Amino acid sequence: MIEMTADEEKQTDQKEKKKKMNQLEIDEILDIMPHRYPFLLVDRVLDYQEEESIRAKKNVTINEEFFQGHFPELPVMPGVLIIEAMAQAGGILLLKSYQSEQEEEEQDRDEIAFFAGIKEAKFRRQVRPGDTLILEAEILRVRASLSKVKATARVAGELAAEATLTFATRQVGR
């Protein structure tokens, strides 16, 4: 029998609590998403309910490469990257939901959720360095390999952007 130290036991308890709360840390996000720096735009998943919704965050810092050119005298996060961050949160939700189904079916296949469409995108406020984007997505519909998600991005409770996003889920290698 393997005995754990008090610190190891505490860390194990903390990990179990996080799993119960449906949170994901960056290492778990990296296991799910194919994106990497500088294009991974989700830092942490605060909560998710499989096949329903997700709440994630992106810490926006002045060190982001896009601020060098957008705009040096008034740094503003590009709207297309806010949409991409919302899409990544939606992709995590879809992949976590599919991953659970795959584990139940005991299949070993990797899938990617490709961003396939956008409707009703609206931008309500600027996102600046120092802001924390809270990304929320709710699954509207899943049909075969196509899914539709309603997503929002908020800063300090204020709506920054919203859109309806479509994803095409494909197996890796196809």
Image (cartoon, rainbow, N blue to C red):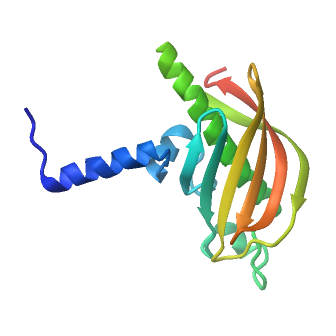
In the image, residue 30 sits, relative to residue 162, either above or below, namely above
Q: Is residue 41 above or below residue 159?
A: above
* Quadrant of image for the N terminus: top left
x, y (%) of residue 5? 12, 51
**Residue at 79% from the left image edge and 77% from the top image edge:** 71
Can you give x and y, in whole percent of width and height, for residue 74 in the image? 78, 83
Residue 159 visible within the image: yes
Residue nearer the viewer, 28 or 6: 6
Q: Is residue 67 left or right of residue 102?
A: right
Quadrant in the picture for the C terminus: top right
Residue 93 appears in which quarter of the rendering? top right
Foreground residue, 167 or 14? 14
Residue 129 percent across, percent down from the top left: 67, 76
Q: Position of residue 9 (x, y in %)?
A: 20, 49
Please tell me how many numbered marks the rendered image carries: 0
- Farthest-out residue, right: 120
The quarter holding residue 116 reads: top right
Residue 108 visible in this rendered orientation of the protein: no
Residue that appears at 60% across and 27% down: 98
Judge whether 73 appears above or below 94 on screen.
below
Residue 172 shown left or right of residue 146 in the figure: left
Q: Is residue 156 left or right of residue 11?
A: right
